[in-house]
Amino acid sequence: MPDPVLTIRSLSVTFVGPGGIVPAVRGVDLEVHENEVVGIVGESGSGKSVTALAVAGLLPPSARVTGSIVLAGREVVGAPREALRLMRGQDIGVIFQDPTTTLNPLMPVGSQVVEGELAHGRLRVDEAWPRAVELLREVEIADPAGRAAQYPHQFSGGMRQRAVIAMAMAGRPKLIVADEPTTALDVTVQAQVLALLARRQAATGAAAILISHDLGLVAEVAHRVAVMYGGRIVETGSAHDIFKRPRHPYTAALLKSAPRIEAAEGRLDPIPGQPPTPTDLPAGCSFHPRCAIGAHRPRCRAEEPPFRSVAAHGVACHFAEEVAAPATIDAPAAARRPSVGQGEALLEVEGLKIHFPIKAGLLRRVIRTVRAVDGVSLRIAPGETLGLVGESGCGKTTTGRAIMGLIPVTGGSIRFRGRAIENAGRDVLREARREMQYVFQDPYSSLNPMLAVGDAVAEPLRIHGCYDEMGGARWIARLFEMVGLSPSVAHRQPREFSGGQKQRIGIARALALKPRLLILDEPVASLDVSIQAQIVNLLQDLQRELGLAYLFIAHDLSVVKHMSDRVAVMYLGRIVEQSDKATLYASPLHPYTQALLSAVPAPDPSGRRRRIVLAGEIPNPASPPSGCHFHPRCFRAGPRCAVEPPTFEPQPGSPTLRACHFAGPLEATRGAAGAAS
Amino acid sequence: MSALGSAAEIGKRIVVRKTAALSLAYLVAVALAAAFATTVGFDPLSQNLARMLEGPSRDYLFGTDELGRDILARVVYGARTSLITAAGAVTLAASVGVPMGLVAGFFGGWRDAVLMRIVDLKLALPSILLALALIAVLGRSQVAALTAVGLTGVPTFARVARAQVLSLRRRDFVTAVEAFGASSPYLMFRTILPNSWSPILTQMVVLSSVAILLEASLAFLGVGIPPPTPSWGEMLRTGKEYLYESPTYAILPGLMLTLTILSFDTLGRALSAVLEGREDAPVRRGAGPA
Amino acid sequence: MIGYVARRLMQLLPVLLTASALIFGMMYAVPGGPVGVLVGENATPEQIEKVTKEFGLDRPVLVQYADWLGRAMTGDLGHSLHSREPVAKLIGERLPATIQLALTATVIGLLLGVPLAVASALTQGSWFDRGLSGWSALALGVPTFWVGILLILLFAVQLRLLPAASGYVPFWDSPWQMLRNTILPASTLGLYVSGIFARFLRGSLIAELNADYVRTARSKGLVESAIVVRHVMRNALLPFVTIVGIMLAGFIGGAVVTEAVFTYPGMGRLVIQAIGSRDYPLIQGCILVILVGYMLINLAVDVLYVYIDPRIDYG
């Protein structure tokens, strides 16, 4: 076997700052070979990005690096600046997370793409432009000659990331480091960019490190996987082995805690507690406080486990042999809540339209209208969960906020318990808001920083003047218990809590008025994977105990499947398909739903499924395509789709409602559709 | 963490900055001197025509002016004028400007349009000119100086409050309170205002230095508080006439004035760094009279 | 492009209208009203009647305003009460002096501020950087009139190198005399403004140095100096242009105090004289001209952006 392209030996990185010494990476060993993709998985603060920056020699001056990083035969640690500079862009190319900020806004994209090669003297100035066009063509950007002269703001998010890939790979580096390369992108665009990255890597034969918090994504493309926790690699192995037979308790727990799209429903198995911060690492094995095996063993508390070999894996655990094989995925479904969705509707939305005028000029004339929501109908019965999924900008959050009465409605009706509440007066809304509450995505911004959390939970009661009537401090204490927090924390300030705890407080506050409907707007999207499961379970328990109805708004199809009874899929202001969960996930009828479902990465490398990679990106809602909004990206569209918007109606012989002229099962059309790959 | 607890904590974090601690000490000393000037026996008005325009000496630490008055006594009384004008002006500016900005930012529409036109105007006219125009209308008196300086600060506070409303309204915790069915006054004064105190307080300190400078400038131009009330600007104005005879006459009051302004500036920067995590205070956009 | 400028000019109208209404309204806020202003406090009823007739003060206020505005737009700003000369002529004599001083001061400010900002941003946290932030705090905080007095004490009283009072000498008449007369007031203003320039530019340079695209540029293997010149500088200078424009515009009417220290014959002195003699037509004219000047400079800055910032399209 030839020498590895990258060899990392006992790498440690500490940051020296005003707050003291922060150990971010603590002894990492890793090898990456030519033609190999190694995935590094970990939660926030696990040290995965710092490792990547160390490899590229891009750490800030406050970082102290020890150990050894050998890249293409040369030592990186302690190398002189000039040597590092020559290495970058030549031996190593880096792809960063957020394509909106990684490009210089004031320089044409083409110039930025070839800048590295020019700096290394591998390109003459007169060759630069044709080379830029060629590089953009390689990353499949349409009209590369025209695009090269444009500035980043004229590119869409996916195109910017393509340009960044072109830039990173321009010098044919031996190693590509991709740090969360698709996290900032929408699901369907993610699939495109990931596929492109894989193709370019295979074409150049480069070694690659893919860093991600997303197990599914890594399973999809990596050959080998390293799992990081608390600044160390806790497990390495082939992608197949890691996902089929994890040997470290953390990996096993992580796999069990994430909802899976192919799995049947059932309770998630969350990891208790929080991921540690580098400033505050537990003694001994840093995972032991959260570990099912080691939590109470003195050895785990006292002694940091060495990295050792167990059945072709590398594992850092004293008791790796005790980690059980994960239960088979299709475990019997847990008992479902009975008779849900029966009876009178709690919430009925008919033909909801929300248009935002864009005004310009001196006279503030309306020059365009953003049709954020353009005819949405849905219905929620008491005690049931309707999942509303879609990519960013599809109007799902706007729909939720309009139901809550936070955004004026342009057209259509919203009825809550039979009473019309769209654009209603303050009194009607006030009454409806007692029974309908909202939980926000970002727990950091949804709590008033000036209010103790107990007062925050009591605030809705005080506003409605029913604090004493509802039981005062006793009821507040009870609410804290209901969301799994001790009532004794009520006097603390929000900043003393972690993200997951804040989300619990947000839920307690939403429950204060004893509502019948909760609008959950991406309630777990900004939480770490291991925390997501805790909140999902809490929401399910509360629903069962209190008979709550949920409108669950999310972009993550796996979580939606786990939570919902019925699911509606939105695209550009309209619902394209709606059905009960089982039907929708088993046999989607709308091409968009089909593409969306196929794009979900699943942590199961053996089941690499066929993906439908959609062309293009979501159009601007201010100028949506004619006819069916989806037709320019659709693999099934015909001439009719461009002129005639499809009606939202039942599919014959199916419980599904859909808006498509050519709705039907995927298999029936696959032969005809060239876009499926 | 109670409001008092946090005040003590913020105080600690400011005082650990050496320059800020020094500034605070200087300002406290000046304020004490000004407050107890009469008790200590400073007399800014008695003339000693035998000893005019003298330099610093044992009898007169800062020397004497063209009428033989004690410059040190006049400087101390000048501090009183300066600090009172500044405090009054800043209070006036904040109590008018903050509600204006809150209402304009919260309701938008014509209220916002009117406010923004006024802010534009204030940006277009240097404060000194605005203050001069106001003096031209109000006449020359202590109240006029205070009002003129205060009114020029109103748009600054209105803008700060408005910016706070606009940024806080997008935050989820404000939307959450709105979703509970809270009234507009509740949102404005119970939710948004308490979360805006740090930029407003910072602005009050920064504006204190602007107000002192502005008051001194008006006095220097001969349209400030009328004599014989001692004022630093007025002393510099006369001192400048006797540069050849007694250079210290203009230097020493100017030094006191400068130190006071610098102290407020330093304190403002420290506050802004501690409260808002910004190391550089906002540039006073052309606010200082030049 | 012409359309863009026209649109921007249109946007200035509301501010200008508000301002002119306020300026016009000044006359009515004064004790005694416009008649009192014109005839003084001890006027006979005959005098009052004559003036009221002559200036049409018996017409409705809105008509008077429209008339005043209409004449102002054609350049007729009325006559000075004090010297009886046309206000436009008096302003015309002072405006070039002020513009010359403002430009010189801005150039001095840039020559001092920009290199200091760049040097300290690149050596962030060093003693030089800390020194600069102390220095810029001084430049900002020390009152210009005190700086002016100190400069006069040093260069005129002690060294006897330069005149204590500065006159206006146009540059093309005698560059040497112009420099001798302008250097002290211009340095006073330049020092002050260099503090603002240095602090602002340092801040935006540091923000840009920490931007993601700089990390990208490093990851491509660019030389550090190329990163600063090609990437950081342009992004940092972009917002800086606005600050330079605002300061330059501020000097048109805002150098009142400095002009007073050096008895420099600019707009600021004119305003002070006008206020001192309660010469209301002259006050109104000065404020109006200063306002328009300020707006035109800001418009010029906005137009400049269309050329230097690709993200702005003037369509």
Image (tube, rainbow, N blue to C red):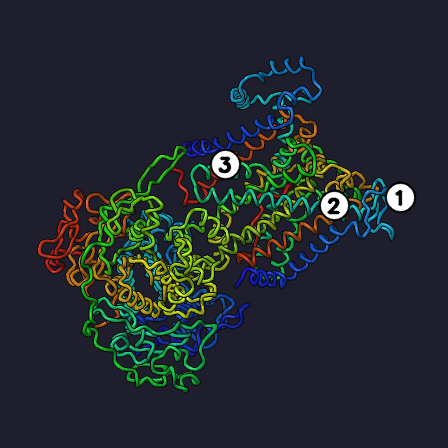
Q: Which mark is residue B51?
A: 1
Pointer 2: residues within 10 angstroms few (<14), some, or many (20+)? many
Asked if marks 2 and 1 touch (Cβ < 8 Å), the reply is no
For label 2, the residue is B78
- Residue at x-position 78% and y-position 45%: B74
Q: Is residue B57 above or below residue A274?
A: above
**Closer to the camera: disc 2 or disc 3?**
2
Relative to the observer, which residue lies in front, A105 or A460? A460
Q: Amino acid at mark 1?
A: Arg
What is the residue that sits farthest to the front in this orientation? A469
- Answer yes or no: is residue A124 visible: no
For label 3, the residue is B117
Q: Quadrant of the C terminus of chain A?
A: bottom left
Q: Are marks 3 and 1 on the same chain?
A: yes
What is the residue that sits farthest to the right in this orientation? B50
- Image position, residue C309 (x, y; %): 44, 44
**Closer to the camera: disc 2 or disc 1?**
2
Q: Which mark is residue A143?
A: none
- Image position, residue B228 (x, y; %): 78, 38
SS for callout 2: helix
Image-quadrant location for residue C118: bottom right
Circle nearer the N terminus (2, 1): 1
Q: Cα distance, mark 2 to mark 3?
A: 36 Å
Q: Amino acid at mark 2?
A: Gly
